[in-house]
Image: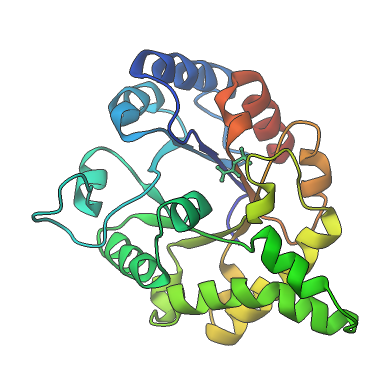
Amino acid sequence: MGRKLVVGNWKMNLLQKEAKELSCAIVDLIGKNYDNCEVVLVPPYTALREVGNCISGSNIDLGAQNVFGKSRGAYTGEISAPMLVDAGCKWVIIGHSERRHLLGETDEQIRKKISLSISYGLKVILCVGETETQREEAVSGSKDISTKKRDIFSPIKTQIENALGAFDEQGLLDIVIAYEPVWAIGTGKNATSLEIAEIHQCIRELLVEMFPDSGNNVRILYGGSVKTGNISDIMSVDEVDGVLVGGASLSVDSFFKIVKLIGS
Ligand code: PEP
């Protein structure tokens, strides 16, 4: 298993000047020699260059929030994997719930994006997670606990199987999974340690079933309203290999505290 990983997803926030200030402040605090955990900053496309310049020479990597499933051509408004590599990205987030649910991204598109990204040497953070309705339906009615657990995991299982089913063990080396319950993203409600542990265990078992040689080595992150107040609880779950942070990554203080706590 690699080091713990902290990913800051800035979403559609910050102009270039603000992104420069935030990333340079993060570099100042984390320092060039900090390597207790791996840190990735994921700004909007327009700020990739500014952030790339600030983190240059540090241990922080650059990531992008999305990619298209073709490498070039007449796809107005899209961005390709080689373009991201050219812009200095080492990582790309794929299948974020905001893209799946607000923009209609399908499992098939996600599979293509992963495949192409890996072929260009990008490391992929694949986001998966159940909606509030899916969880409520799964726990409703008089079922036994293991059936409820199976039903909660069912949509996540489908997302992972559809995204990764066509890959071989080698392809898996560049993939990290982020479990992000949709009801916890940007809502202030985070999953409990028990809920996180249950889903992370299910994801691990599925990965080992699908990829007997490398399934155990894939890092599984948690995401969904991670902040300074809950990071200790989240990281106390054995199965959590790091976090994907949205809102709290926009403040240097909270992001730094999260990184320090994970790396300590
Ligand atoms: C995210 O961007 O994936 C996320 C989890 O956001 P937030 O931390 O704001 O819930």
Q: Residue at x 60, y 51 (%)?
A: 3
Q: Residue at x 50, y 79 (%)?
A: 161
Taking the image in four quarters, ligand 1 sits in the one at: top right
Q: Which corner quadrant of the image does residue 114 belong to? A: bottom left
Q: Quadrant of the C terminus?
A: top right
Answer above or below: position of 120 versus 45.
below
Q: Position of residue 243 (x, y in %)?
A: 63, 46
Nearer to us in this view, 207 or 15? 15
With 129 as the anchor, is 47 left or right in this view? left
Q: Position of residue 189 (x, y in %)?
A: 76, 43
Q: Residue at x 31, y 52 (%)?
A: 67
Q: Which corner quadrant of the image does residue 24 belong to? A: top left
The outermost residue toward the left is 74
Q: Position of residue 99 (x, y in %)?
A: 44, 52
Q: How many marks?
A: 0
- Residue 26 appears in the rendering: yes
With 227 as the anchor, is 90 left or right in this view? left
- Residue 212 appears in the rendering: no
Q: Quadrant of the N terminus?
A: bottom right
Answer above or below: position of 49 versus 245.
above
Nearer to us in this view, 234 or 182? 182
Q: Position of residue 178 (x, y in %)?
A: 58, 57
With 88 as the anchor, is 224 left or right in this view? right
Q: Which corner quadrant of the image does residue 169 belong to? A: bottom left
Answer above or below: position of 115 versus 132.
below
